Each structure stands twice: as C-alpha cells, then as structure tokens.
Image: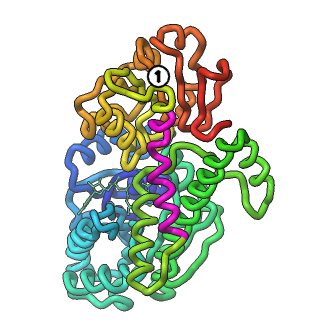
Amino acid sequence: MDISIVGTGYVGLPAGTGLASKGHDVTCIDIDQEKVDKINSGECPIYEEDLPELLEKMVSEDKLRATTNTEEAIRDSDITFLAVGTPMKDDGDINLDYIKQATKDAAHGIKNKDSYHVFVVKSTVVPTTTEEEIIPILEEVSGKKVGKDFGVCMNPEFLREGTALNDFLEPDRIVIGELDEKSGETLEKVYEGFEAPIMRTSLKAAELIKYASNSLLATKISFINEIGNMCKELGIDVYEVADGIGMDSRIERSFLDSGAGFGGSCFPKDVRALINFMEKNNVDPKITESTIEVNEKQKTRLVDLLEEHYPSLENKTVAILGLAFKPGTDDIRQSPAIDIISELKQKGADVKAYDPEAIQNMKERHPDIEYTESYQKAIENSNAALIVTDWAEFNQISRKDLKSMDEALIIEGRKIRHKLDDGITKGINWP
Ligand code: NAD
C-alpha cells in the first residue's frame, strides 16, 4: 500500500521504516527540512537500535522517502498515519496544537482526491479526541464526508524508545480503534505481514487502552520504588524482593526495577493527562495521582543519598553518568537527570556529565555544566558519581577508574550493581 506518515519523530520514523520493510511504499512527512534531507540521504536523524541500517536500506531501495509537502504526499497515498507530538502543557493536559495543525495540513491532501482515504491517529490522545477534535477538522477542511469519502482509525503505539523499531515490528498486540468496518479493514491490511493479535474496537476505547497501559506500567514502577524505600529501612535487597514478586505469572518481573523513577516523553505526560481526564469526568484519580507523587520524590533521592555522605555539596565535583531517560536512546525528555543536575547546581556542586548518546540534547537544557567524552573522564577527580541511566558500559567501571576519583563514592540510581567493595557503591534502594 502507499502510506504517508505525518510526523517523523521517535514514533513516525521507526513506524515508517518498519512498514517499508514489510513491502509498503512509505512517505514520511515532516516540517523539519533538516530531518527530511537527512532521511532522503539515508541518514537516521535519531538514535535508535537497528534503525539507521534499515532506514538506509529502505531509502536506497526506494521504499521510503521524506518530504515537507504534506498535501502532495497525502494525495499520492491510500492511508495516512498522524504521528506528531502531543506534549504536556503546564496544567497537565495534552497540547493538541500540533496534531490539529497536522490534521488541517493533511485534510488539504484529500480535497481533490476521488478515491477513498483512511486517516489513522497514532499520536497519543485522550479519549474522544479523535471523534470530537480530529474528525471535525478533517471534514471542514477537506469538504468531504467521514464514513463516505474517507475513513478514520485510532491506532495507539506501544513501542519503547531504545528498541522502537523491533517493538514496532513485533508488538504484543495491535489495537485498531475504528470509525466503521471499512476503516478498520483498510488498516488491518497494512498489518497483514505482522504476527501479533489484532484487536478491533471503538475509537475512544483504543485511545483509553493506550493511557491505561502506560499508567499501569508507571504505577508498577512507583509501587516498587515505595517498597524499595521500605527495604532500605529494613536492610532488605529490593531486587531480591522484585525477583520474588516477579516469579508470579499474574504479576511478571518487568517494570519492577526500583531506582531513580520514570521519565521520558510518555509516562509522566500520559499519567498526568489521564489524571486530568478522569477529574473532568468526575472520577477521583487516587492511584494515578500517587504514582506521580511517588515518582517526583524518587527522582532526586540520589541527591538525598549523596547528602547523607556530604552534608554540604558546595564545591563538590559530582559526575553524572547517563543523561538519557533510559539506555538505547538520545531522548532526555523528562529524564530524572534534568532535575538531578538542577538540584546539584542549586546546591553549589560542580557537575561533570557523560552519556554515550544524549549529551547534545542535554546541552540545550543545561549548557553551563562540563560534558566529557567518556565516563572515565567524568569520574576523574570527582567526589562522587551518580549513575542515572543504566547504559551497559557503566558495568565496566573498575577499581582502576575509582582510583582516579578524589573520593570513591558511586551511587547507583539504576540496577547495575557491578561488583565493587561495599561502601563504595551505594544503590538508591539497596540495604
Ligand atoms: P516527536 O516529537 O519525536 O516527533 C514529532 C515530529 O512531528 C517532529 O519531527 C516534528 O517536527 C513533526 N511535526 C510537528 N508538526 C508537524 C506537522 N504539522 N506536519 C509534519 N510534521 C510535524 O514525537 P514522538 O515521540 O514521535 O511522539 C509522537 C506521538 O506518539 C505522541 O503523541 C506520543 O505521545 C506518542 N508516542 C510516543 C512514544 C515514544 O516512545 N516516543 C511511544 C508511543 C506513543
């Protein structure tokens, strides 16, 4: 099929590349000319495992191309995915400006088109948005009738950054929210080459499935962090407890790694948006509110632990190892590292930071700290190192590295646990 994707970010690009690899002809649309030029020259504009190689292959085989011309790309395709950002506003609601604008741009593309077209909302939007915000724009701008001239689906994306391409290609399930049967049938054809079970449902149920999934995963993390904080008081290893809980097939081990809390572009914003949405619908969001509250405190617990060792951080040099919100990505959106660095700066510490992929992005948030080209350089002559992201290379930190520090103190905010002397390495929720 001829597919167009509006928004070529962490979702749109892996999705577009993945669909091209399944034999579809894909046009990626973005307003960012630099991104478009990079893609057309076979260069991947974001860091994601396996994506650069497949992207280059798909571009060279002419299965994937990028453009800034939305109208033309929509006109020349059968189905369009809307995958632009829906970031969080200050009040916790989602900002619909980008998706509304993208919808307007896309609707122009079917104005003079005679054949049936399907629009698929892939961006994460709160229940009823597709029906109440997106469809009216599509009808008004195109002058066409939904259900007759064009169809609409809501197809939430569950991929994880870091493993986005593989998650997209091998999902646990594909949820298709559909306006009507014809829309759903058309989208199901796109996923013909996929092995995952397909669930067909209403537009608003699909929208809610995405929010409920992310909020439940975030709640698992906050729950284990709360248990972890208690473990620390009792001298119990929380990872052992998590292993014990996770052996129960009803619970499952994933998302039970206690640590510096969750970040990223999805969990914090999706949980907050769900809270607001529930309140607007007169439902008391007790659990989801606590999920956020626990996480906010957890993010800077690393600094609390550091202060147990150094009551004053004034002029102490602290190395931050890991800036991305998780390994395998250069994305720093809502990363705990942002708050940790702010807090350290405010307390007078000198911060040196290292990350294998995310330095460039963090420089825009914290331009005034020192960035190093290796973790060794970051910890050299420092008074303490905080591991914020569990990049595999931090497992290699050795006794030799520790000798280069002014004082050998490492506090791990993630489950890495390389074998160093007790007393040198402290875990956020370890005994
Ligand atoms: P992103 O910010 O990485 O990418 C969005 C892209 O859209 C940018 O490249 C931007 O230039 C482009 N854009 C904005 N307006 C446009 C327009 N009018 N026309 C064309 N392009 C336009 O966002 P993302 O992380 O890919 O997220 C997209 C959506 O998917 C969001 O709703 C998000 O919540 C959801 N989602 C994200 C993830 C994730 O892990 N990042 C996972 C699942 C779902």
**Is 295 one of the magenta-colored residues?**
yes
**Three-letter amino acid code at the position of disc 1:** Ala
Q: Quadrant of the C terminus?
A: top right
Of residues 305 and 332, the one nearer the viewer is 305
Q: In this picture, is 316 found above or below 79?
A: above
Image quadrant where residue 411 sits? top right
Of residues 194 and 32, the one nearer the viewer is 32
Q: x and y percent of residue 324 in the render?
A: 42, 39
Residue 425 visible within the image: yes
Q: Is residue 399 left or right of residue 349?
A: right
Residue drawn at 33 percent across, 41 percent down = 45
Q: Mark 1: give few (<14), some (14-19) or many (20+) Cα within 10 Å.
A: many
Q: Is residue 13 left or right of residue 345?
A: right
Of residues 10 and 318, the one nearer the viewer is 318
Q: Is residue 251 left or right of residue 139?
A: right
Q: x and y percent of residue 183 in the render?
A: 45, 82
Question: Pointer 1: what residue?
Answer: 384
Q: x and y percent of residue 59 in the render?
A: 38, 45
Magenta-colored span: 287-305
Residue drawn at 43 percent across, 29 percent down = 311
Q: Secondary structure at mark 1?
A: strand
Q: In this picture, is 35 found above or below 277?
A: above
